[in-house]
């Protein structure tokens, strides 16, 4: 699928990467099996990382209930806005609930991130 960059999708990607990092850390711990102390440290860190991702997933669930569902003016699909400014999950159209924020905040934060994901 395309690289979505709406906030919920970003957080979801972050949570998923935390799980991978957790497994990688625990895998590294196996190499230290001769040293019980280091192996325990790596295992605990790996578990903490996986637990953190669970917390983040739970947080996404909380955020999703707060997100406002709108139909995108650009592609017409139903997407969710988180906070005052966010992007369409499907076409990355910048969306805002607050008309006074149109312009500045997008230029500073979202356009920049757009370019990063394009390159
Ligand atoms: Zn759209």
Image (tube, helix red, strand yellow):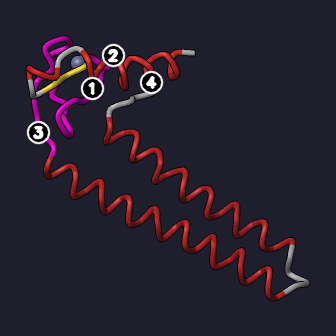
Report, in whole angstroms, how far the alpha carbon at label 2 lies from the one at label 3: 22 Å
User: Which mark, residue 113?
Assistant: 4
The answer to whether mark 1 and mark 4 are in CB contact below 8 A is no
The residue tagged 3 is: 68
Report, in whole angstroms, how far the alpha carbon at label 2 lies from the one at label 1: 13 Å
Magenta range: 67-93
Q: Tell me, yes or no, whether the highlighted magenta stretch contains residue 70.
A: yes
Front-lying residue, 30 or 100: 100
The answer to whether mark 2 and mark 3 are in CB contact below 8 A is no
Image x and y of residue 68, in percent:
11, 39
Name the mark nearer the viewer: 1 or 4.
Answer: 4
| Disc with the residue nearer the chain's start (4 vs 3) | 3
The residue tagged 2 is: 107
| Disc with the residue nearer the chain's start (1 vs 4) | 1
Name the mark nearer the viewer: 2 or 1.
Answer: 2
Front-lying residue, 40 or 1: 40
Ligand 1 is located in which of the four quadrants? top left
The quarter of the picture where the N terminus appears is top left
The answer to whether mark 1 and mark 3 are in CB contact below 8 A is no
Image point 78% across, 73% down: which residue? 29
């Amino acid at each position: 699928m395309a690289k979505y960059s709406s906030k919920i999708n970003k957080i979801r990607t972050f949570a998923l990467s935390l799980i991978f990092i957790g497994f990688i850390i625990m895998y590294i711990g196996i190499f230290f099996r001769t040293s019980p102390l280091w192996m325990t440290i790596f295992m605990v860190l790996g578990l903490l990382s996986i637990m953190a991702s669970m917390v983040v997933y739970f947080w996404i669930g909380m955020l999703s209930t707060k997100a406002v569902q709108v139909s995108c003016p650009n592609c017409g699909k139903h997407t969710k806005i988180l906070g005052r400014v966010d992007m369409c999950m499907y076409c990355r159209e910048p969306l805002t609930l607050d008309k006074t924020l149109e312009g500045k905040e997008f230029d500073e934060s979202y356009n920049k991130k757009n370019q990063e994901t394009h390159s």
